[in-house]
Amino acid sequence: MTEYILAIDQGTTGTTALLIGHDLCIHGRQTIEFPQHFPKPGWVEHDPEEIWASTRKAILYLIEETGISTGQIQAIGITNQRETTLLWERNGGQPIGNAIVWQCRRTAEICQSLKNQGLAETYRRRTGLVLDPYFSGTKLTWMLENLHGAETRAKSGRLAFGTIDSFLVWRLTGGKSHVTDVSNASRTLMMDLQKLDWDDALLKPLKVPRTLLPEIVPSSQVYGKTSSLDFLPDGIPISGMAGDQQSALFGQACYSPGQSKCTYGTGAFILENIGDTPILSKHGLLTTVAWQLDDKTSYALEGSAFIAGAAVQWLRDGMGLIESSGGIEELARQVSGSDGVVFIPALTGLGAPHWRSEARGQISGLTRGTTAAHLARATLEGIALQIHDLVMAMTDDRGIPGSILKVDGGAAENNLLMQMQADLINRPVSRPETIETTALGAAMLAGLAIGFWADTEELAKGWNEEKCFVPQAGDDWRETLLKQWREAIGRI
């Protein structure tokens, strides 16, 4: 009987359930979408019950599609949208309100208040993060202050806090396990990076009682077993968890310091394994826990470009230059270069290493000879140049250059973009056979905990490259493009 790991990839717009075999291949996949809710400008929420319903339905459809027996599922791994925050009743498990999504900006005033108290450096030093509404801690503060009766119930121990990983494990185990893994805990502003534990000095300014918080656990461990579900039998171990970007790093087999991956989606996220000692960035990058296996913790530097694939969507939907996102490569290949056109895709500001929230997109270098093809090529260059800046910041923070950059996500299928990326960072870019590296990482972590795979060496051997993009452009091309980019950034 063929055995599988069930991976649950709980994302911002949908939940995907996948079956991963010993061969590290995907043997079935089902995605169920659910809505986002926008009660006010800048506010983003999810209904936790809609998340749970999408998880249940994705698993049911997966089992029906593949025709497997649930007895073939050996373990469950979970990866999730990070930072999204919710509270639920310990007695019965009912959420007390909608979840506040990682994209939500409602806690900007709370963050500013903490900065005004001179706490920015304390949080950066202890958590590796910046005081920003992105992270879970200030979302939790807002919920305690604004949801009816939340503060009183929290202090009396009647409520439970969690990011989505915690909520799913609670539900899957019938309320028996209240845990979060270190990678998700490291995104809350409440965990000390060195101690890997909740820190009272961080909790007090946020007004968060410890009674709310889950136990912080390794990323690969049996946290509990399925119980009292109508779509899975009792007794399946839940044994792997990691936030989506850390899970993708693990799924890309980046197990040694200097190895890195970039996920190209709506935005682009690059993480580099920095080993067992956290490094605080000099360039505004985030320091985060990558994963913990047994008693060994790996850390990562993280940088994000807020706009990547979204710039291509803008060309498609806003400008009407292409009919589909995939059409940008064909259009951009109609010219050999952007002919001096520079597109800074700061449509929602610039992230690290620039950190300019007020910045807006800019197109410069236009002439009478500029065509749609030049703009398409400049758009791809703009995406790749943002990643170049992040790679260089990581190199400077670590003091040594990284190795090959592994890539995944929808835009990683664009061969022209990947070649540009290799040429700009002047190092090979490697695309794997399995693009679903986020779910793969969760399955790997779950499988390691139960002996489905022996160790990371076995997993690394199972990682296969589909295509490697080797730097081809000369130094003159690179330096010219970088000079134009820096000048354009300076004008924003």
Image (cartoon, rainbow, N blue to C red):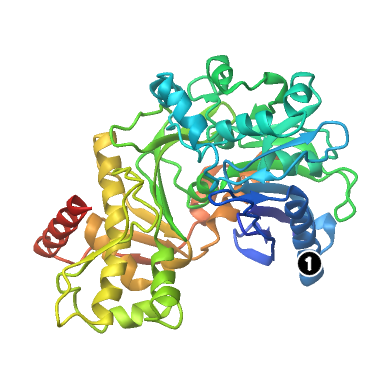
Residue visible at 48% across and 48% down in the picture: 249
Residue 119 at x, y percent in the picture: 43, 20
**Relative depth, front residue between 281 and 217:** 281
Q: Is residue 462 above or below residue 301?
A: below
Residue 144 at x, y percent in the picture: 68, 29
Name the residue carrying label 1.
61
Residue 78 at x, y percent in the picture: 66, 47
Residue visible at 56% across and 45% down in the picture: 102
Mark 1 crowdedness (10 Å alpha carbons): few <14, some 14-19, many ≥20? some
Task: Determine whether, in the image, residue 178 is placed left or right of residue 241.
Answer: right
Q: Quadrant of residue 214?
A: top right
Q: Is residue 35 above or below residue 349?
A: below
**Relative depth, front residue between 135 and 356:** 356
Residue 288 at x, y percent in the picture: 46, 35
Residue extending furthest toward the left: 476
Q: Is residue 186 above or below residue 102?
A: above
Query: As shown in the figure, which amino acid type bears the numbered disc 1?
Result: Tyr
Residue visible at 84% across and 55% down in the picture: 71
Q: Quadrant of residue 216?
A: top right
Q: Is residue 486 visible?
A: yes
